[in-house]
Amino acid sequence: MPREEGRKLIAQNKRARHDYHIEDTYEAGLVLTGTEVKSLRAGRANLTDGFAHIRDGEVWLEGVHIPEYTMGTWTNHAARRPRKLLLHRREIGKLSGATTESGRTIVPLSLYFKDGKVKVEIAVARGKRSYDKRQAIAKRDAEREMQRARAARLKRR
């Protein structure tokens, strides 16, 4: 059987980019059970409530919902259990240094398969204020309007 290659997206946390200023991103592996991987292969996961924290020199991912595998038996996993992230020691050091500053947290951005292995993209993020969110929405709407005007102008020619 040929080995999987490339990157296949499982889940994305669009809410994180809306709620946080993303400062630095990292790619990490996940310690998973067999039924979790099978559930992810079916494309089922939810990152919206997820966050990571550092405990005893290890990074743990909490709040990520990977539903139980439907064909699983008594070996099935808990849907919201804490999962260990696999990172290099210096990356863990950078993350712990970044999160000691107030207002910063570690959030998952996306979950994907990379060459057959499950990876998660995590980011050090600072929370946005409500006026920042409104400005981002207004900017996006203005860019969309400009794009529509350009397209309409090109159509008329």
Image (spheres, rainbow, N blue to C red):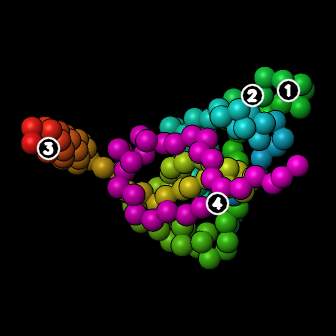
- SS of the residue under disc 2: loop
Q: Is residue 108 visible?
A: yes
Tell me where residue 26 appears, x and y as whole percent.
55, 63
Furthest toward the bottom, the residue is: 90
- The answer to whether marks 3 and 1 mark residues whose Cβ atoms lie closer than 8 Å is no
Q: Nearer the viewer, residue 127 or 72?
A: 72
Amino acid type at image mark 2: Glu
Residue denoted by label 2 = 68
Distance CA(mark 4)–CA(mark 2): 22 Å
Distance CA(mark 2)–CA(mark 3): 51 Å
Q: Residue at x 30, y 49 (%)?
A: 128
Mark 3 or mark 1: which comes first in sequence? 1
Distance CA(mark 3)–CA(mark 1): 56 Å
- SS of the residue under disc 4: strand
Q: Which mark is residue 15?
A: none
Q: Which residues are magenta?
A: 1-27
Residue denoted by label 4 = 28
User: Which mark's residue is nearer the viewer, 3 or 1?
Assistant: 3
Amino acid type at image mark 3: Leu
Amino acid type at image mark 4: Ala
Amino acid type at image mark 1: Gly
Q: Residue at x 54, y 73 (%)?
A: 94
Residue denoted by label 1 = 72
Tell me where residue 21 appears, x and y as whole percent.
35, 55
User: Which mark's residue is nearer the viewer, 2 or 3?
Assistant: 3
Left or right of residue 88: residue 141: left
